[in-house]
Amino acid sequence: MKDDSDQVYDKAAELFAVLSTPVRLRIISELCQGEKNVGQLLGNIGVAQPNMSQHLNIMYRSGILGKRREGAQMFYRIADETAAKVCRAVCTQVAIDTAVN
């Protein structure tokens, strides 16, 4: 039987698994600046539309992103602030370490 600390590590591992691709980190970075539609994300992140949709769906299903439809457009936003904070902290530290070295 798992105790509370095991559940914490399991949840953290699930979050890191979802955040394990550079495209998803870039999506979170873009959405930290505010809600965006798929076209805006595609314009700022150089990936093909089917690839973008796959990443967005994985992040939506995991609870990291929320979405809403407006007409024919789908808008995405950060739904899990913990994921955004983890992304920001790790990427900031890596940028600092890269600049120093």
Image: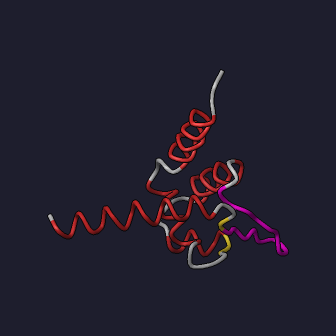
> In which quadrant of the rendered image does the N terminus lie?
top right
Residue 80 place in picture, x, y as percent: 65, 60
Residue placed most toward the observer, 90 or 17: 90
**Which residues are the magenta region?**
64-77
Against 47, residue 21 (above or below) is above
Residue 6 place in picture, x, y as percent: 57, 32
Within the image, what quadrant is residue 4 found in? top right
The number of numbered badges drawn on the structure is 0
**Relative to 8, is 46 on the left or the right?**
left
Within the image, what quadrant is residue 91 found in? bottom left
Residue placed most toward the observer, 10 or 49: 10
Residue 62 falls within the magenta-colored stretch: no
Residue 67 falls within the magenta-colored stretch: yes
Against 74, residue 82 (above or below) is above
Within the image, what quadrant is residue 30 found in? bottom right
Residue 76 place in picture, x, y as percent: 69, 68
Against 74, residue 14 (above or below) is above
Residue at the extreme right: 71
Residue at the extreme left: 101
Residue at the extreme top: 1
Residue placed most toward the observer, 3 or 83: 3
Q: Main secondary structure of the magenta part?
A: strand
Residue placed most toward the observer, 76 or 80: 80
Give the color scheme: rainbow, by chain, secondary structure or one colour: secondary structure
**Relative to 43, is 79 on the left or the right?**
right
Residue 97 place in picture, x, y as percent: 24, 63
Q: Residue at x 14, y 63 (%)?
A: 101
Q: Residue at x 62, y 64 (%)?
A: 81
Q: Residue at x 48, y 61 (%)?
A: 87
